[in-house]
Structure formats: C-alpha cells, structure tokens
C-alpha cells in the first residue's frame, strides 16, 4: 500500500513538475547530493566518499536513511541520517527532512542505496538536480543514469565504494557541450 501511495504521488508530481534531464560533466559539477541507506554504525565508506568529493572541490550533502530508530553519528556536518521517526505512515520524509533538499539546486544527485527504500525514493523524486544517478534498477522516470546493481543485493562497504568509483568514472568520461 505504501508503494502504491508513493507511485500515485510520483505520477502527480511528475505531471506538475516535468524535468529536463541534462548530463553534467564531473569537472563542471559544484554541488552533489548523496543518498544512501545507513547501517546505523556511521560506516566509513560514506565518510570516505564525502571526503573524496570535498577534495574535488564539490559542495556535498549526504542524506542517509536508517531503519533503526537510534540516531547515527558521522562526525561530519555534510552527513545527515534520518530514521523512522522522521517519516510519516506512508514513508514520506517529514517537512524538516524535505527542507534539507529543497533549500538548494544540486548539479548531481547520486543514490548509493542498493535496495529500494521508499523514503530515499521520495528524496530522489523531490530533489531539484540537473542529473540524477542511481545504483539500482530503479525508477526510470526519475533517474537519468542507472548503474546496474542486480548482482549486488547485499549492502556492504565494498559495493558502495565500487559503485561510487564507477559513477565518477562515467561522469568524468561524459563530454558535454555546455
């Protein structure tokens, strides 16, 4: 039922807000929104990914969703984890979480979650990003570029690092005319 409600809201949102996909060259990218599923332990892989983007002079915001109800500390101001307390009955993130992504336009949205989590799907839908990238066979209406994760159903540090490196490789290979 929650997925059905999401699909209904998605259809309505896309009708009101049609988006024009634009491929973004990594060198020209200034802001990146990372979405991920948190294991609740403050995994090192996300810290490394955020640091890598910061080293490349990118403004980064990383939003993670944890199925656990306890807060997760990452000791990085760019990484924020929300949980079940921050979503409504239908798994839509509450206003405070949505406001984090609505405050700015991003050049890139990179969804590093391996499984389909409705709260992450909402953030992907509502985010204003020039290019949206995912690591799973996902909502083709939402994402512009999807890196297949069919063989990697398990969430682990190696997969997240691997997918991130692959995405960056492809972004650096894209040649745009703008």
Image (spheres, helix red, strand yellow):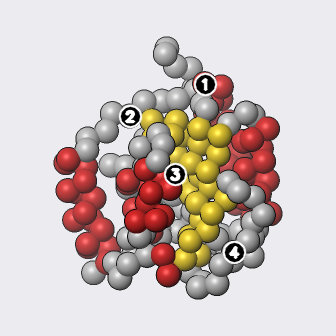
For image coordinates 26% across by 41% down, the residue present is 18
Residue at the spot of label 2: 21
* Other-residue count near label 2 (Cα within 10 Å), few / some / many at <14 / 14–19 / ≥20: some
Distance, label 2 to label 1, CA atoms, is: 16 Å
Q: Position of residue 136 (x, y in %)?
A: 51, 57
Distance, label 4 to label 2, CA atoms, is: 33 Å
Residue at the spot of label 3: 134
Q: Position of residue 13 (x, y in %)?
A: 25, 53
Tell me if label 4 and label 2 are in contact, CB under 8 Å. no
- Residue 63 in the image: above or below residue 92: above
Residue at the spot of label 4: 72
The earlier-in-sequence mark between 1 and 4 is: 1
Q: Nearer the viewer, mark 4 or mark 2?
A: 4
Q: Quadrant of residue 152?
A: bottom right
Residue at the spot of label 1: 28
The earlier-in-sequence mark between 4 and 2 is: 2
Secondary structure of the residue carrying numbered label 3: strand
Secondary structure of the residue carrying numbered label 4: loop
Secondary structure of the residue carrying numbered label 1: helix
């Amino acid at each position: 039922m929650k997925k059905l409600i999401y699909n209904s809201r998605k259809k309505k949102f896309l009708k009101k807000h049609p988006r024009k996909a634009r491929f973004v060259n990594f060198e020209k990218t200034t802001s990146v929104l990372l979405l991920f599923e948190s294991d609740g332990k403050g995994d090192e892989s996300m810290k490394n990914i955020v640091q890598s983007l910061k080293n490349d002079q990118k403004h980064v915001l990383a939003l993670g969703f944890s199925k656990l109800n306890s807060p997760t500390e990452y000791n990085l101001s760019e990484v924020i984890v929300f949980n079940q307390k921050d979503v409504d009955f239908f798994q839509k993130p509450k206003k405070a979480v949505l406001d984090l992504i609505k405050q700015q336009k991003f050049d890139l949205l990179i969804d590093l979650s391996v499984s389909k989590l409705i709260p992450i799907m909402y953030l992907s839908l509502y985010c204003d990003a020039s290019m949206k990238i995912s690591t799973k066979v996902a909502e083709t209406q939402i994402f512009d570029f999807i890196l297949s994760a069919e063989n990697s159903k398990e969430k682990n540090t190696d997969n997240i690092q691997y997918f991130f490196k692959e995405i960056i490789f492809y972004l650096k290979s894209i040649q745009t005319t703008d």
